[in-house]
Image (cartoon, helix red, strand yellow):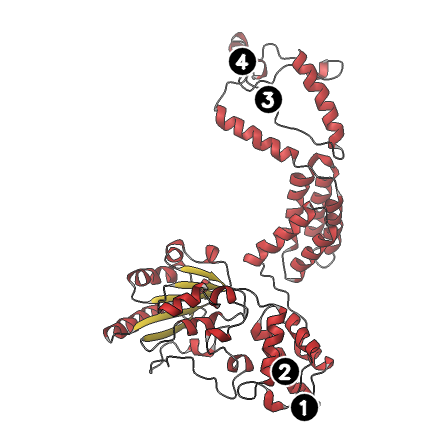
Amino acid sequence: MADEESLELFPSEPRPPRPAPAAAGAPLAERMRPRSLDDVRGQDHLVGPGAPLRALVDVGELPSLILWGPPGVGKTTLARLLAAGDDVEFVALSAVLAGVKDVRAAIDRARTAARAGRRTVLFIDELHRFNRAQQDALLPHVEAGTVTLVGATTENPSFQVVAPLLSRCRVYTLRSLGDDDLASLVRHAVSDSERGLGAAGVGLTEEAARTIGAAADGDARRALGIVETAVALAKRASRDEVGEDDLREAAGRRALLYDRDREQHYDVISAFIKSLRASDPDAALYWMARMLEGGEDPLFIARRLVIFASEDVGNADPQALGLATSTFLAVERIGLPEGRIPLAQCTTFLACAPKSNASLTALGRATAAAREGGSLPVPMHLRNAPTPLMKELGYGAGYDYPHATPDAFVPALNVPDEIGETRFYEPTDRGAEGRIRAGLDAWRKRRSES
């Protein structure tokens, strides 16, 4: 959610050169915002000594950039700190609320500031919420240097920012805060009497601080919200230390980080498939549970199981594709929550099944040969001969019907001469594919000898 200042699109007075202290009644997360780069936690790769953003501040330069990272890691705060300066006009927009009209008004304001010798940093929170038209409206002004764009997004810019705008911005990735960073942050907030909760006189054990850090799932805003509530609960009960019940009530049910439409969607499904491929049913079940708990469409998971059954198990266990297809139909018919049961059955079966991608690999080799060879002629004995003329021309001549032979096998070559005896399909010796390999080797030997 955008901060309160971003809702005030065009304040009448210039913003102070440094972030102003938050009001005493503001939420703890607002009061504890870092006031300098030295106070920023968990982002040493960007603001530590010699790091990219620190270097930009040291030389007084600020190009257009995009700050990409999960919620609550300091994107808005970092934007404010980067834009601090006496000659800088800081204009904040929330992409959730603003439209093209607001962007144009910000550009007009930037032109006015430029005539007064001030440069404008246009900060757009939730940049990914702008549609293509809104992003295109920004492009010429970023390109001309009318504004320096600082965008903040929780979504992968490669997916959500139009290519022309993305090419004109540097992208910096902020990391989810570690449990140690969050525990340190809440300890500091509890002891700080100026901006934090020190005046409340409620203590916090090391174990409680670490519990809050783990429950916050990398989100500093959430960690500070939990500790603020927990301290208030303890104080109301006249306790001098945050207790386990206070933490449980303040934290509630831990929200899982999973966005079914964006990058987390792709990361978690990737982890699911790779766990199946690694024959690790425990990990596969965990990632499947993460998806289901995050609201993923169960049919999406079922479709991926069907693909996996053919791509990664294949002929090593021919039952896999049938089970996966049945799982899809079962989930489609019964839905959730009961659909979780066949999903779990199929997941554990596929994870434990012998693996072979020989069919997929064979298709890749055959495709390469087809592209390289072009439209090679179909051998005459394989051609269709529906008319007398075509039969006279030799279409279908020499074709032997396999079912008319004792063992239903004809050793003729069935590819153009240029392909010859090239082998595309190389079965493994795993599972049922081992039996297929033995039979195929015998057929290939007979074909070669003939």
Instruction: Find the distance from the CA under tag 2 to the CA under tag 1.
Output: 11 Å
What kind of residue is marked 4? Thr
- In the picture, measured across the screen, residue 47 lies left or right of residue 443, that is left
Instruction: Find the distance from the CA under tag 3 to the CA under tag 4.
Output: 33 Å
Q: Which mark is residue 236?
A: 1
Instruction: Find the distance from the CA under tag 3 to the CA under tag 1.
Output: 80 Å
Q: Is residue 358 visible?
A: yes
Secondary structure at numbered mark 2: helix
Q: Are marks 3 and 4 in contact (CB under 8 Å)?
A: no
What kind of residue is marked 1? Arg
Secondary structure at numbered mark 1: helix
What kind of residue is marked 3? Thr
- In the picture, measured across the screen, residue 283 lies left or right of residue 37, that is right
Q: Residues within 10 Å of mark 3 (few under 14, many from 20)?
A: few
Comes first in the chain, label 1 or label 4: 1
Q: Residue at x 70, y 76 (%)?
A: 207
Q: Which mark is residue 229?
A: 2
Instruction: Find the distance from the CA under tag 2 to the CA under tag 4.
Output: 86 Å
- Mark nearer the viewer, 3 or 4: 3
Percent coordinates x, y for residue 432 in the rendering: 76, 33
Percent coordinates x, y for residue 56 in the rendering: 39, 66
Give the image quarter of residue 367. top right
Secondary structure at numbered mark 3: loop
Q: Are marks 2 and 3 in contact (CB under 8 Å)?
A: no
For this rendering, which residue is in front, 117 or 365? 117
Q: Which mark is residue 422?
A: 3
- Mark nearer the viewer, 2 or 4: 2
What kind of residue is marked 2? Thr
Comes first in the chain, label 3 or label 4: 4
Q: Residue at x 74, y 25 (%)?
A: 438
Residue on which disc 4 sits: 387
Give the image quarter of residue 231. bottom right
